[in-house]
Amino acid sequence: EQQQQQQQEQHHRHAIFHHTNAVSKSFPIPHPDIWHKFVTPTSREEESNRNNNNSSPSFWEQLLSSAQNKVKNNEQQKNQLVNDVTVQFDDATTGAQELVKQCQLFTQRSDDTTDGKESTLLPENTMMEQEITQHLADVLSYFQSVACNDNSNIKCQARIVSSIGKNGIKCPRWHADHVPVRLVMSIIGPGCEYIPHEVEVMGSSSNSRLVDRNALNTLDEDDTRIANDIIVPPNVNTEAVTSAKEGYAVLLMGRAWEVSSEGDFTDDAKLAAVHRSPLLSSGQERILLTVDLVPHS
């Protein structure tokens, strides 16, 4: 039964992965200055605390709170996870609209939020909101065209995470995803690093690859640096590794769409794309969009 399910998943693999396991397409980011709001630590928690406290804090409470916040800010300011938004969708436009809404990118009229009235966008933000929404819809639609084979009944999931510093390094170790396909796109900051199939087998000897696939699958090593040097040896030409740029949507074929028998690492075997998160410096901003198929329950 498991073999039958694997054959069915392979059957639905998109033809775009016939000769490769990683495809990149440019979607230039509109209004990156607006996106920077999503990576800036918000004051929502502070506002919530003010709303929940009816009495004003004493002088000593204010002094203590100020000192605690200063220490906390010094520790977290340069390395922190700022925001994390996840939306499920089957229609790309609806999914994009919900992402923009959940990310709270736009300023709202303060005079419309009183007396139970609906909040509305400021007029100057309306056009920017439409352009950002359309941009996200184009990316989500691109994923659907490959992952769903134009089947509109398949549900997808989009996630946008903003971070500062090393907390944005989600997966620093070389790995392959246990999914059919995943889209990864950096909105702000560096994108993922990956080694396409055609590069992995280029110039390799018979039954050999630039990536040690045995180590990738079975290596028991806790030290990420050591593990990475084993999976992709340091003597491998740095040009073999592609570093995605901002606005480049990278479709990475996962293990569920592999075409090979167990242990077959020959050049003809189409294996899942090997990739990892880029190194980030302290204080470096990053916003990452990932899109996946929602697993069957």
Image: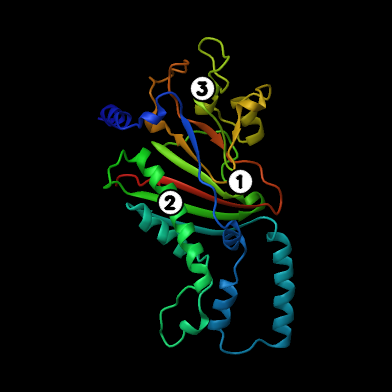
Label 2, residues with CA under 10 Å away: few <14, some 14-19, many ≥20: many
Q: Which mark is residue 78?
A: none
Give amino acid for label 1. Answer: Ile
x and y percentages locating residue 61 in the rendered image = 70, 82
Give amino acid for label 2. Answer: Ala
Residue at image coords 49%, 31%: 273
Question: Which mark sits nearer the N-terminus, 2 or 3?
Answer: 2
Give amino acid for label 3. Answer: Glu
How far apart marks 3 and 1 lie (CA) works out to: 26 Å
x and y percentages locating residue 277 in the rendered image = 59, 41
x and y percentages locating residue 168 in the rendered image = 60, 50
- Mark 2 vs mark 3, foreground winner is 3
Q: Which residue is mark 1?
A: 169
- Drawn side of residue 157 relative to residue 131, left or right: left
Label 1, residues with CA under 10 Å away: few <14, some 14-19, many ≥20: some
x and y percentages locating residue 106 in the rendered image = 52, 68
- Helix, strand or loop at mark 2: strand
Q: Which residue is mark 2?
A: 158
Residue 214 visible somewhere in the drawing: no
Q: Which residue is mark 3?
A: 198
How far apart marks 2 and 1 lie (CA) works out to: 19 Å
Residue at image coords 35%, 32%: 14
How far apart marks 2 and 3 lie (CA) works out to: 28 Å
Figure check: 122 above or below 283: below
Question: Which quadrant of the structure image shows residue 259?
Answer: top left
